[in-house]
Image: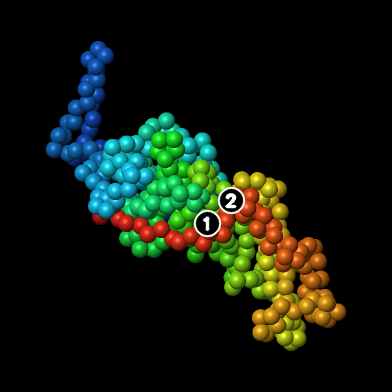
Amino acid sequence: MKSRKIISMVLITTATVLLGACGASDKAGDTKVIVKQDEDKEETVNEHPEVQPEETEDSQNKERFIGATPKLPEDDTAKDTEIYRDFINGKSKLSLTFYCDNIFDEENYDTHDFSDIRDKSLTFIEFLEEFEKKAYIEISAVAYSYIDCGADGKKELALEIQSGDGEAPYENDYVVIKDIDGELQLVYMLDGECGANGWNDLNEFGYIMTSGQGIATTRYYVDALIDAEGYYKYGYSSYDGEPRLSLEQFYEIEATSMDYEKCDKLSKAADAHGVVPMFYEAKIPSVDNIMDENAKKYYCVEFYNKRDEIVDVNKIKDKDFYKNIMEEFKDIKFISKEEYDKKIADRKAAIGLTDKICSGDMPKYTEILNLQ
């Protein structure tokens, strides 16, 4: 979304400059606006009524939603989701206070700043109008689903907001709305796109898995959660390969030099002994904040044979290839795989990210509004 935002902002700025230049022209066909003052009254007169001023972007935005009516499936009649249907049908409004006070983070590109309208309550259509402006997109369609954040049995409303043709996941934004004490609150939003070749997934229990392009051939992953109370809980980030990091990938991330010829020699030396080193790396914050400066990195390395079986380090620790690999990363403290897995398990437990929540299905969205 970041790239879409920047491009849209440039186009909007360019259009504004061009419109300003047209208004400053002295050609006879231009529209002049004269303001007549009569005591405390002002009247705007168009000298050329046949030439109408161009519409502002805001008015054009609103016109797209005139007459737009969402249509829910006839079988959506459950009592526990009635409050969400009322919102979609324009019978109730959405508050932004929870989101503005607890969720918005100017360092997080997935979130948008609604602070200028924090105290406004918005209908479904009004929210879509505001979302277009904040996200710098043009909505083409909206689909919905009910999810169960935190797997507590209470439903939340998830909206899939599509832009473009809506076919690629990265062209979709996701919004989560929750009934908090009888008032609908915006609790989270998620961009389907995540950097280069990346995406965000939101499952039926509020588990958020982010995958993105890391350094060179590596990929990074982030685990997070929207809990039963509607709060976003950041878990941890990790680098993974398929599914582990090869020596070459780990070298790209952590080596103190860019001597890839040396890396190739290390890899070939291990291969000559029928051994393949594999690495793990995770970054775990001490608090929920994604930008935690005290986040710690944990590393693990294991050695496998050609049958993908773990090799006992005691059997290779005296070999030159092993010593050379470990010497290359001598400033890194490696822990055992058991310790590494426990660090991640403890972090998941701390934010309430259970195996059930992680293994939930992806929601099935049903289209309720098409603006194309």
Quadrant the N terminus occupies: bottom left
Callout 2, which amino acid?
Gly
Residue at image location 35% in from the left, 57% down from the top: 365
Where residue 55 appears, as percent x and y from the top left, is 25, 40
Residue tagged by mark 2?
Answer: 352
Where residue 31 appears, as percent x and y from the top left, is 21, 36
Along the line of sight, the residue nearer the viewer: 3 or 130: 130
Asked if residue 200 can be seen in this view, the reply is yes
Residue tagged by mark 1?
Answer: 357
Instruction: Measure the C-alpha gap from mark 2 to mark 1.
Output: 9 Å
State left or right for residue 324 relative to residue 145: right
Along the line of sight, the residue nearer the viewer: 178 or 19: 178
Where residue 13 appears, as percent x and y from the top left, is 39, 45
As helix, strand or loop, the secondary structure at mark 1 comes to: helix
Displayed quadrant of residue 259? bottom right
Quadrant the C terminus occupies: bottom left
Residue at image location 19% in from the left, 38% down from the top: 52
Residue at image location 32% in from the left, 56% down from the top: 366
Asked if residue 96 can be seen in this view, the reply is no
Callout 1, which amino acid?
Ile
As helix, strand or loop, the secondary structure at mark 2 comes to: loop
State left or right for residue 273 relative to residue 142: right
Displayed quadrant of residue 264? bottom right
